[in-house]
Image (cartoon, coloured by chain):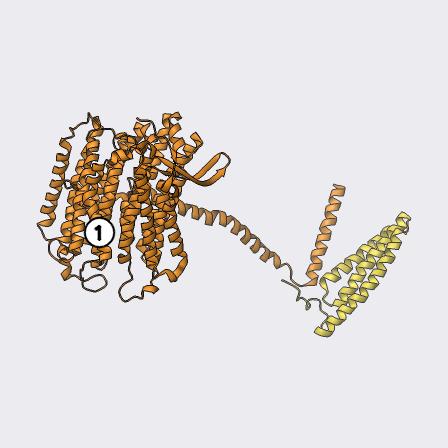
Chain colours: A yellow, B orange
Amino acid sequence: MSPTNYLLLSGLLFTVGAIGVLVRRNAIVVFMCIELMLNAVNLSLVTFARINGQLDGQVMAFFVMVVAAAEVVVGLAIIMSIFRTRRSSSVDDANLLKY
Amino acid sequence: MTAPPEVLPAGGAASAAWLLFAIPALSAVVLFLAGKRANAWGHWLGVGSVLASFALGVVIFVQTLGVAPEQRTTEVSLYSWIASGTLDVDFGLRIDPLSLTFVLLITGVGSLIHIYSVGYMAPHEGAEPSSDSSRRRFFAQLNLFVAAMLVLVLGNNFVLLYLGWEGVGLASYLLIGFYQDRPSAATAAKKAFLMNRVGDVGLALAIFLLWLELGTLQYTEVFARIGELGGGTILAITLLLLLGACGKSGQFPLQAWLPDAMEGPTPVSALIHAATMVTAGVYLIARTNPIYDLSATGRVVVALIGVVTLLIGAIIGCAYDDIKKVLAYSTVSQIGYMILAVGLGPAGYALGIFHLLTHGFFKAGLFLGAGSVMHAMNDDVNMRHFGGLGRRMPITFVTFGLGYLALIGFPFLSGYFSKDAIIEAAFGQEGWQGWVYGGAATLAAGLTAFYMTRLMIMTFFGEERWQKLTAPNGEHYHPHESPPVMTGPMILLAIGSVFAGFVLSAVGLNQWLAPSLGELEESTHGVLPHALVPWLVLAFSALGVLVAYLVVGRRPTPVERPEPVSLPVRAARRDLYANAVNESVIERPGIWLTRALVFLDNRGVDGLVNGLAAGLGGGSARLRRLQTGFVRSYALSMLGGSVFVVAALLAVRFA
């Protein structure tokens, strides 16, 4: 099977994730879309590792997963605390930090 | 020309000559700093310090008289004042006949005017004497003036002369503006200061030029080496010195400040703006006579300035109703005579100083008399409100009358000797100069007789017009004779006015001044014979008196100024348009220039800076709106940015 298909899938996932981040208001969904983008990149990293016959990309994918896990911990905690104070998980409601 | 006398070190009392100006200076400092504690006795300290100076001056004078004429020029160096590279100026004093003459005039007349001021500046009746600090302030400033004037005439170099020159300018400024609550006094003080500054620039440039060319500023060395310079340089120096003299002495074209200076208290007008400071220009030219000896063109300019000024002063003096301004223009005119005299060169230096001395007596006496009249008339100065005062104030009338006779050159009074001598010397010139100088001086003598007679008639004779009037403060006039502390100095000055001319010419003032000014040259081939001139002057003066009697004395004087009047009178009432010319030629362009510069500064320079700041601020205010607070729009801009960067990379890569 041609690695190009994996790259196409990766691009597709990334696009879905990016559009999700831009158009969705629910913080949890935005968060999930970010994960989708990360994993799309992971997929492309692994694919390139395969194409080039090196392990660098695969190692990088592991790193990304570790960092993403840590990020989830922090991110979900922030979303939880915002939800508790505002009774809302819409990212558009949390817009105090502006001009 | 005789060789300049040898300069000897001063000995005896002359070595203490620094005390002459140190005593009044110290007194001024005490009066300035002592505050209200000195209110009660400050004026007597001021009088005492000048009297002490006068006594010391007399001692030095007597000592100098005791030695041979060629040993009378002495110098004493007090300390090294400025030592900077090749510029080395000592604080040195020159005690010679010329400076001693001035010392005696300044401290002598100064003492009398100080005594007079004790009465004139006394707090008004009912006021607590110790609560009034204005008299103490007045004496402090008057002492400061005396000290500065003595520095001016005693210095043995141009820098010290300049120090005194500026010192008297400062004192004059302070005293003209003495009545600080009057806007007119403040304006007059500023005007005097600014117009003096024009002259001072000329003096400063002359000093710079001397330093540049000769590398020294000591009188002795400058005068010894002045012959090394080229004719053009000497002419430039003489003209710049003349500019300085014009500023200080109220000579054309810088005469307009002197009449306005009458805003000051009357003793100030008598001492500073009649007897001493305004004659500093005459002193300057007489002192630098070795320079003027070398430049005939420079002397002609000096004499012409004198001629123009003496005519201007005499003409304007005929039209004013303000008693002090008439006297002020009379002063302008008389100093014009002195400048004319020193402009005649070796034939006139001593005559200029002679007239300066006699003028110091009678003009100071006239001003003190005018002050006495004002004192009696609620500080009114308009002669149209006076009339018949001779019966009410006999002492003032007699002393003023003697000063008047001396000024118009009544035979054998002091003005007769000094002014006629100048006019004779003027006619003693050859060619057109003799006719122009002599003719103008004779004509002005007639005008002098006219305006002074007019002043006398309007003030002391005729109907008592003040009976029907009320003073500006609403009271009725109650003319009364002034207290003895004021009439005493007036009597002494009147005696001086009568006898000074005779005494000074009898004892040989010209020979006395010869070591400083050179021998007086008698002209032998003038345009008019010598014997004729006094009769001519006398005829003109008599004509002036007669015309004044016919025009003013025979008719009742209207209380209101008659309008309209003929063109010459209108011009004279407006100072022959001197102020108008100054305003249109100098003041208005200056104002326009300032406004243009202010506009350029506000709109141009400030506009650039402020515009930049406003542009940045406005741009930032708009740019700020990008921070919406919506995370998703930030994400969009990040995405857009990333896409742009990637696109740019790809474009570069595959281009």
Residue, disc 1: B490
Residue B328 lies left or right of residue B16; in this view the side is left
Q: Position of residue B345 (x, y in %)?
A: 28, 30
Task: State the image coordinates of residue B606 (x, y, percent, origin top left).
Answer: 49, 50
Q: Residue drawn 71% across and 72% down? A: A88
Across and down, in percent, residue A69 comes to: 84, 63
Residue B28 higher or lower than B227, as above or below: below
- When asked about the image quadrant of residue B184, the answer is bottom left
Instruction: Name the side, left or right, on which B604 lies relative to B350.
Output: right
- In the rendered view, would you say B103 is above or below B40? above
Residue kind at label 1, given as amino acid type: Met
Pick the residue in front: B144 or B41.
Answer: B41
Q: Report whether residue A54 is seen.
A: yes
Residue B592 showing in the rendered view: no
Q: Quadrant of the C terminus of chain B?
A: top right
Q: Kindly state the secondary structure of the residue where label 1 is placed.
A: helix
> Label 1 lies in what chain?
B
The residue lying at 39 percent from left, 41 percent from top is: B15
Residue B522 position, x and y percent, is: 22, 28
Residue name at image x 37 percent, y 49 percent: B23
